[in-house]
Image (cartoon, rainbow, N blue to C red):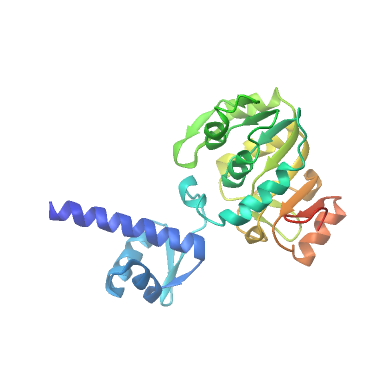
Amino acid sequence: MTSTVHVVLAERRHQLILRALRSGGPAAVTDLSEQLNVSPATIRRDLVKLEEDGLLTRVHGGARAEEGDQPFAEVAEVRVAEKDAIAARAAALVQDGQSVLLDIGTTAYRLARQLHGRRLTVITSNLVVYEELADDEGIELVLLGGMVRREYRSLVGFLTEDNLRQLHADWLFLGTSGVRPGGQVMDTTVVEVPVKRAMIKAGDKVVLLADSAKFPGTGMAKVCGPEDLDVVVTNGPVNTETRASLQEAGVDVILAGKAGPA
């Protein structure tokens, strides 16, 4: 019994360590020790185990998270106020009677929360968006088919892409894990990239939702270039090089909280 409890406690600590590193960046052993109220020696053992599992990299005096997929529930807790500001500004672009395609991810979910009471058609492969809007009778809700990724609350695969080839939306609201200085939209989740590309082809106007942490953010797989975007909605100033790349491609940059382009 004691051994089982020890394993459960260790697993919970590991979850909390990874969440802290993913949301706050690299952290020192002493800081993690204080946050979790355990000894530095315990934290060091945890970091060794997590590094062996490929989930983090130990650095001098601490650790940093490995870039990669994060479960939806973890990402949903990060930068909520920023995402809500972006979502509110993005929702104001949409007129009643229009069709809206919502991407996988947590910012799209925050946008869905802003659409209650509207007369719209919403198309999505985001299961949390579906759950949010399922009981709103004013919204025609289209759920794309595909293979369920349970941890990430999304549908992906060739079925999702085939469905998208048969549809068209007035607006696509696209998420990202990072925007490079040249304006390239990146993602850490390779399996989602073909779905995002199919969404871009299905959308008349493509709006990228990206909080300030996404410049440059992360991501190893390119989703699209700036020429595929119409609008970027963000919550903070975009660095000079990235802004120039977006403007050269004719992309409007809208700062959440302001009436017009940033």
Residue positioned most to the left? 1
Query: What residue sits 49% from the left and 50% below the top?
Result: 70
Where, by quadrant of the figure, is residue 257 drawn?
bottom right
Q: Give the x, y percent position of residue 195.
A: 63, 36
Location of residue 77 with respect to 37 vertically, above or below: above
Residue positioned most to the front? 117
Query: What residue sits 61% from the left and 47% below the top?
Result: 107
Location of residue 51 with respect to 86 vertically, above or below: below
Q: Give the x, y percent position of residue 132.
A: 55, 35
Q: Give the x, y percent position of residue 210.
A: 67, 53
Q: Give the x, y percent position of residue 117.
A: 65, 32
Query: What residue sits 74% from the left and 61% below the top?
Result: 181
The image shows a total of numbered marks equal to 0
Of 124 and 166, which appears nearest the observer?
A: 124
Query: What residue sits 48% from the left and 32% below the top?
Result: 148
- Residue 198 showing in the rendered view: no
**122 on left or right of 58:** right
Location of residue 192 with respect to 148 vertically, above or below: below
Location of residue 124 with respect to 85 vertically, above or below: above
**243 on left or right of 80:** right
